[in-house]
Structure formats: C-alpha cells, structure tokens
Image: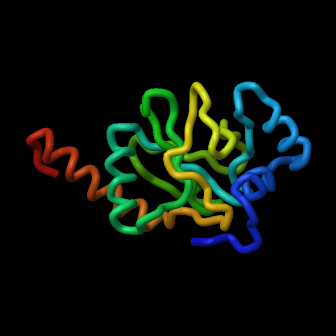
Amino acid sequence: MTIPGAKTAVDWLVSVAPDPEGCRWEWERNPLGVALLPAGRRWDVLILPGKLGRPTLDVLRLLLGRPGPVLADFGDSRLGFFVPAGTASRWLGTGVRGAGRGTWIVVPYPGRATGGVRWLELPDGEGTLTDPAVLELAMHEAAACVLAKEGRKP
C-alpha cells in the first residue's frame, strides 16, 4: 500500500508531527536521534513480541520482497509493523499491541543508529505500509513455523 505525495522517509515521518519543521529540527539535533511521533494520522503500528515478530518479518520479506517500515526495540523483544491508519482500532490478536490515534511512537531518525530502537525496514519515502491482511497471513505462517521448531503442532 502506498500513500501518494510522500517525498522522503524523513518528510513522510515528520508530516504527522504537530509542528513538522520543529520536529525535523529537534530530530536532526537530538543526540539520541529519536523523536516522538503520533500514530493514527498516516499510519498505525502493530507491535508483536520478538519471538513472533522476527519470523513474521522473514515471511513478509519472502512474500513482498520489501514490506513497509518495521521497528525493533533494544534486544528485539518487540517489533513494530507500520500499517494503514485505523488498523490498530480494528485489530484483534492475542499478544499484539496496537498503536493508533492518541498514541505516540519513539521513532529513530532514518539511517541513524540509536541505543534503544532501530529500523529493520526503513520507510521508503513513498509511504509504503504493510497490508494488514498480508501481515496477518505472515503471522499465521510464522506462528506455525515457531511451533514446528518447538516440536508442537499448530
């Protein structure tokens, strides 16, 4: 899925900030290299536990080549998949957290390393997001693979 009109990853990300230019200025000068950005405007984030998130990302890469943006926290204990705005309020899934309208996400500056959160898939600047239906299918496949590795049946 693509949101038209996005020029660069930074432009696309800061476009959701209440003050995009102020956000960009702070972000580029912040020694931590992170910004708090509101979810629910152009995108929501579905947050999966790392044990399911990593294999889900692997399945998405096989299916799509390049999925939408994906964040990982320190130690990969959680992965955040960027999906279309409104998805989080409709998502039902055990162990999956949704960040939508009214929530804020810690976002690292694209291409910069930070101590706590990093991009596993950078935004492409075109506004590409992961389709929630494809994400759900990838999660089912990933869960089956995780269970099979543990010697359990899905």
Q: Position of residue 61 (x, y in %)?
A: 38, 60
Colouring method of the image: rainbow
The single residue placed furthest to the left in the displayed view is 151
Q: In this image, 6 relative to 116: left or right? A: right
Which one is nearer the viewer's eye here, 98 or 131?
Answer: 131
**At 52% from the left edge and 49% from the top edge, which residue is drawn?**
70
Name the image quarter holding the N terminus. bottom right
Which one is nearer the viewer's eye here, 112 or 60?
Answer: 112
Q: Quadrant of residue 23?
A: top right
Q: Position of residue 85 (x, y in %)?
A: 65, 60
Q: Number of marks in the image?
A: 0
**At 11% from the left edge and 43% from the top edge, which residue is drawn?**
152
Q: Position of residue 154 (x, y in %)?
A: 16, 51
**At 39% from the left edge and 45% from the top edge, which residue is drawn?**
53
Looking at the image, residue 136 lies above or below residue 98: below
Looking at the image, residue 60 lies above or below residue 148: below
Q: In this image, 22 relative to 47: left or right? A: right
Q: Position of residue 63 (x, y in %)?
A: 36, 68
Q: Quadrant of residue 25?
A: top right
Q: Quadrant of residue 83?
A: bottom right
